[in-house]
Image (cartoon, rainbow, N blue to C red):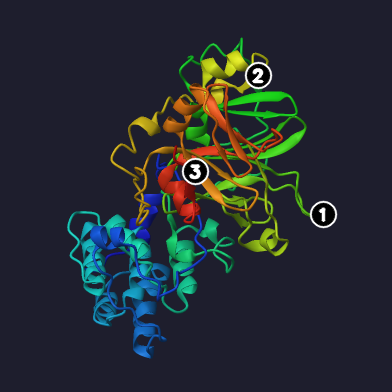
Amino acid sequence: MPQTLARLTRSLIATPLVVLSCLAFDGGPADAAEPLPDYVIEQFGAPPDVPDGPLTNAIQFAVRVAFVDSVTLGVWDENQTLALQEIANSGDPRLVWIISDLMRFVPSQQLHATLSDAAGTLLGKEFTGPSNWGAVTDHLLAWDIPAPPNYLASKRAIFTNIVPGWNDLFIEGDIDWRIVSWGGVLIDARPYDTTDDGCNCIPAVDNPEVTSAEDATWLKDDDIVFGIVLNGEARAYPRRIMEVREMVNDTLGGRDLGIPYCTLCGAAQAYFTDDVPNGVERPILRTSGLLSRSNKVMYDLNTNSILDTFLGKAVTGPLAEKGVQLNQATVITSDWGSWKRTHPETTVMLERYALGRDPDFRNGRDANGPIFPVGDVDPRLPVHEDVIGVVTASGKPVAFQRSTAFVALSQGDEIVVENVRLELEAGGIKAVDQDGSDLGSHQAFWFAWSQFHPDTELWTQ
């Protein structure tokens, strides 16, 4: 029986969702000759053989019918079924990336199962269960399966026909489009300084109103806050608010900041948005509704340029052409009691920005691991272990296991790697240079830090 994709997807995106999104970028496919780590083979098995040539005319036609026409024409009927069979019999695992893209949006269990079976045939795996998009994508990521030729055009057709607001984002750039998917919400494209306007998105806060610590009676001492100090001015961004908003554009200590919080990777960061090349307008950071390996995709509202959330590097659009690289300020993850004792003059965002919600995603939603595909994870630490991450003067990324480092610092031990020295600060940990200056460190889950920095050093006592 024919199924109308347009009707299916309309119902999916018309309802407000509470799925939160985050992003990271890979530099692209790894060298095909590079062997996979043993832990990847142990968890996912051996990868299938992958061709490296062009697609045949017949397969190109099948791709258009099954994936592009099904979305642009809003139909799945016998033509799409036959085209998918042709793709499944091609022996080309690269095509599973497009199958995965379509699987992400299909609410029909029957069609989802059909796509899953085709993916399993091409990958040499049997996927069971009502929803296999995550398992299929995990295998693609872990095995680093290359994208098929002309992949972005097919992916763009699928995504932008379902959410037209992404039209300006799906362009060529220094971004690995294979691993970008949907986070369950629409793009936050509201104009700047329209904080109170509703949207079916994760709504950023621009120029938040703040109050004193004394007046913030709604916060409990053990509530988690993200603290920033610039030019002697301290401010707390409560996690309760950041889990709902995920993005703040603020000014603190005379500096403009863009502050993304990736709920899925446990990382709040602060980027200076006033330190950009001449002729570049201050970036206004927004959440796109897209994610990658359980990480937020953020973009600049002014230019529709995508920026790497963890690294602050512009990877598409006018900002990428200008070579924009945002620098970070340190974010201290602490509790409200410790923060206000150390910084009694601190200001804090108003309770109303939490929109009446009191979520605790950190302690519930992620209990069984990342809820979106991440592929393989460096096994040196548990997936959700908290680390303090920083980059040394030589460009070497270093991660410090927070629990171990906190105990060592509390006992008076010194923790130094190259020019980096860790210090206790207001119930949290920060990294400073040899002269005590800020190095822009922040806390994150291990899986996220190690994905953004696959060559990271892990500090050990």
User: x, y percentage for residue 304?
Assistant: 63, 56
Residue 226 visible in this rendered orientation of the protein: yes
Does 179 appear above or below 55?
above
- Amino acid carrying label 2: it is Thr
Q: Mark 2 points at which residue?
A: 346
10 Å crowding of disc 1: few (<14), some (14-19), many (20+): few
Say which of 29 and 361 sits in front: 29
Dot 2: what SS?
A: loop
- The foreground one among 161 and 49 is 49
Q: Residue 277 at what x, y percent from top left?
A: 78, 54
Q: What residue is shown at x 60% (from left), y 52% (from top)?
A: 299
Q: Residue 278 carries which label?
A: 1
Disc 1 secondary structure class? loop
Find disc 3 in the rendering and name its residue.
Answer: 399
Cα–Cα span, label 1 and label 2: 33 Å
Going 37% across and 78% down the picture, which residue do you hit? 63
| In the image: residue 205, left or right of residue 291 | right
Q: What residue type is labelled 1?
A: Asn
Give how far across and how far down residue 451 sits, in percent: 45, 53
Neighbour class for label 3 at 10 Å: few (<14), some, many (≥20)?
many
Question: In what element is the residue under mark 3?
Answer: strand
Amino acid identity at mark 3: Ala
Task: Give how far apart the Cα atoms at labels 2 and 3 are.
Answer: 28 Å
Residue found at x 53% / y 19%: 336
**Residue 126: percent from left, percent from top:** 18, 65
| Circles 1 and 2: CB atoms closer than 8 Å | no
Marked residue nearer the N-terminal end (1 or 2)? 1
